[in-house]
Structures are given as C-alpha cells and as structure tokens.
Amino acid sequence: MSEPSRWLIGLLSALVMLEGQWCAASEAAGDALTLQSVLSAPLDRQYGVMSAAADILEAKANRALVDSWYDPTVSIQGHLRYIQPSRVATDPNTREDNAIGISARQRLYDFGRQAMREGAAKQQVISAELGLFSKEQQQRLALLNAFFAVLINDQIYTVQNERMAVEYVRLDKAKDRKELGLASDYDLALLQRAYEEVLFARARADADRRLARRHLAELLGVPEQIPAKLAIPHLSKWLSEKPPELDLAIKDALQNNPELEALRARYRASEQSLNAARDHNAPTIFAEVNGDYYQRELGSRDPLRAGVYIDFPLYDGRLRDAQIGKAQAARMKLAAKIAEQEANLREATARTLELIEVYRTAATSRVKALENFSDLNFTRKQTLYQMEKATDLGDAMVEESSAQLERMRTTYALAVYWAELAALQGQPIDRILAPLPSSGVLPSPHEPTP
C-alpha cells in the first residue's frame, strides 16, 4: 500500500472516531434540549389538546345553561294597533289600541328534574376535564417517543457514517491493488456496490435525523424552532427496576385511568338524563308579575297582575317516550364503551408489564453481551493496528457504535413502557424522571378536580 493511501486511511479512521466525542463536547458547551423541558413544555398550542380544552369550555357552557333554569326572566311586550270600534263600545271614537307591558317570571319548583339535569351537566364537565388530562398524557407520550427518536436517529447516523468510512477504506485499498494487478474489475465493482449501498444508508439516516427533529418541533407546537442539540437523559435506573404485580397494576389502571374515568362520568350523566326524561311530564310551579299600560281602557285589562302558577302537562304525544328511548340508548352505548375500555386496559397493562420484563432481562443481557464483545474486539483490533497487522480500526469502531445504539434502544424502550404504565394508571408521564420508590410501584395517581 502506498504512503498517501495509508495516511488517508488513518485520517478517516481518526476523524470518524473523534466525531462522536466532538458532538458530545459541542452539546455540553451549548444549551441542549432536555427531556425534562420537553415533558414539562406547555401543550396549549397542540391541536389535540386545544380540541380537548374546547370540550371543557363547551361542557361548562352547557352547565351554565342548565343552571340558568332557576334564573328569573324579564321581558317587555307591546303593540301598535289601529281598530274599528264596535257600535256598543264604551268609547266608539277611539281608533288606537296601543299597549306596552313588562313581565317577570321566576321558576320555583319542578319536583326534582332540575337537580337531575344539573347533576348530568356537572358529570359532563368532569368527563371533559378528565378527557383533557388523557389527551395531555397521550401528547407527552408522543413527545417522549419523538425525543428518543431524535437521539436514536443520531446514533444510527453515527453508525452509518462509520460504516461508510470502512467501506471507503476497503474501496481505496482495492483501487491500489488493482493498479498493482492484484484485484480484478469484479472485485472493485463488488466493493463499489457495497460502498454505494452504505452511502445511501448514510444519506437516508441523515435525512431521518432531520425529519425526527422537525417532528419533535411540531409536537412541541413550535415548528419554526427545530432543536439542534438534545441532552442525553440518564434513565439507566429503569434497566433493573422490577415492575409491580400484574393484579395490582390492573387494579390501579381500572381505578385511575383518566379515559375510563371520563367514560364513567359520562355514564353517570346519562343516568341523570334518563331520570329527567322519565319525569318529563312532572309539573312546574312558577311565579309571574305583569305590569301593563293600555292606551284604550277596557274593564278586562288590569295594569298590574301577580300570581303563582302551576303547569301540569297532560299529554305530549310520544315526546316523553322518545326522550326516554334516546337516553336509554346513550346509556347502553356508554356501558359498552366502559366494558371495552376496561378490557383494553387489562390487555394493555399486561402487555406493558410483559415487555418491561423482557427488556429489563433478555434485552439488557443481550446489550451487555454486545458491549462486552465490542470492547474486546476494539482492544484486539487496536493491538493489531499498533503491531501494523491491521490498517484501520473501522470494524471495531462500528461494533462499538452499534452496541451503543442497542443500549440506547433498550434503555429508551424501557423508559417508554414505564411511561405508558404511568399513563394507564393516570399518573404524569414525567414521573419516569423522578427517583424510584423502594417498592418499585409508581407514586400515587393523579386526582382529577371535579
């Protein structure tokens, strides 16, 4: 091999080896985006959260509408009218019959229907608030995955970059051998094909890491602020943490899952609505005061009236039956959704615990084996390189980076599964960053505000 080729090979190997260290140093020098800041970022600009917040406003507006049933109402009535008086009229010369009056009405009692409607409206507000918390949980889970996706894509790019350097070195050496007649066109074409394949993989990895950053910015609600540097989170504690017992985890999920609690609140609201529909024909008692001015005086026209009245519906066709049927159908649908959600929660909790166990045992053991081999392989190749029996450390460097990639994938997968378990149990996602309790069970669940 010529001296220029040997110098180029050594330079490429050194540059690839130092690239990861240089990136880490540059990130430490600057302000890198942390996982804590991502999980605590405001979500009010995210469209899914905005929609859930609008549901709360709608539920509160509906509750205010229901609460207004007992509010007094005041109205003014009047008319301008020209008449042709009867021949027996007291004042046959009067042609104008104008009048203006004011009425005030106050509902007094409806035999319990209003309390049922108010209870239904209150439960709808609780359901909407729980729905917002559930949507925020989903959004923070998406942010967690997006944050990890950036770090993993960066590491994939590092691996592909090192592989490209290795293939380039092999191709360059093959060109030197061909000049000496020691390699054929077929050998050169084979290595050229391998180099172009890894060059394409590197370009794709470079694009993927840019797209991952853009996706993270979109989820944060700041698409114009693409994060350049991300801080590596310290999550190794989750590699050995034992998950809780399945029965206990399922019990917590069934008791505290916000989506399930939102459905239960809606079911309670549907029961109240059904009871109100059944009492549709109950009487209503109200008070009314009227004050009127008439341009044309008649004996039957009173300037002031006040009284207490009762309205007792006797027949309304099939309106009551239709309202009862509609309320019953809504309640049945919600009962079915609750049963479906409970089944999904049991399955999701079991799946999450199984994957936690797989990753903290088999996957972690696999990573340790990969890291052990990569360390021994690097030491071996380094010795051969120093003895000038090997021209580069490329393969060993790729093994080191690949082992690091698998370590990241395993650690981040475990963190995501623990975060999913927290979300299933109605707990904030950022609990994965807090110190672990000795029991291994996450802290007390979120308590929604009625």
Image: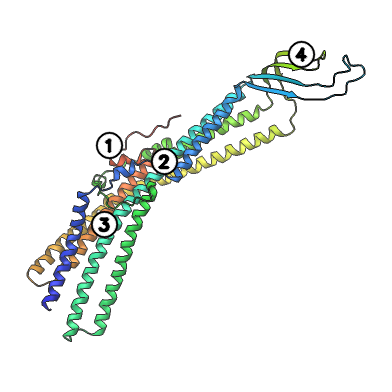
Is mark 2 in CB contact (under 8 Å) with mark 1?
A: no
- The residue singled out by tag 3 in the image is 406
Decide: few, some or many residues near mark 4? Use Cα within 10 Å; few <14, some 14-19, many ≥20. few
Q: Residue at x 54, y 39 (%)?
A: 334
Q: Nearer the viewer, mark 4 or mark 1?
A: 4
Q: Nearer the viewer, mark 2 or mark 3?
A: 2
Q: Nearer the viewer, mark 2 or mark 1?
A: 2
- The residue singled out by tag 2 in the image is 44
Q: Give the side of residue 152 with respect to residue 325, left or right.
A: left
Q: Quadrant of residue 290?
A: top right
- The residue singled out by tag 1 in the image is 439
Q: Nearer the viewer, mark 4 or mark 3?
A: 4
Q: Residue at x 23, y 85 (%)?
A: 184
Q: In the figure, 177 relative to 130: above or below? A: below
Task: Identify which amino acid the numbered label 1 is placed on.
Answer: Ser
Task: Give how far apart the Cα atoms at labels 2 and 3 are.
Answer: 35 Å
Which of the pair 241/413 is nearer the observer?
A: 413
Residue situated furthest left in the rendering: 387
- Asked if residue 37 can be seen in this view, the reply is yes
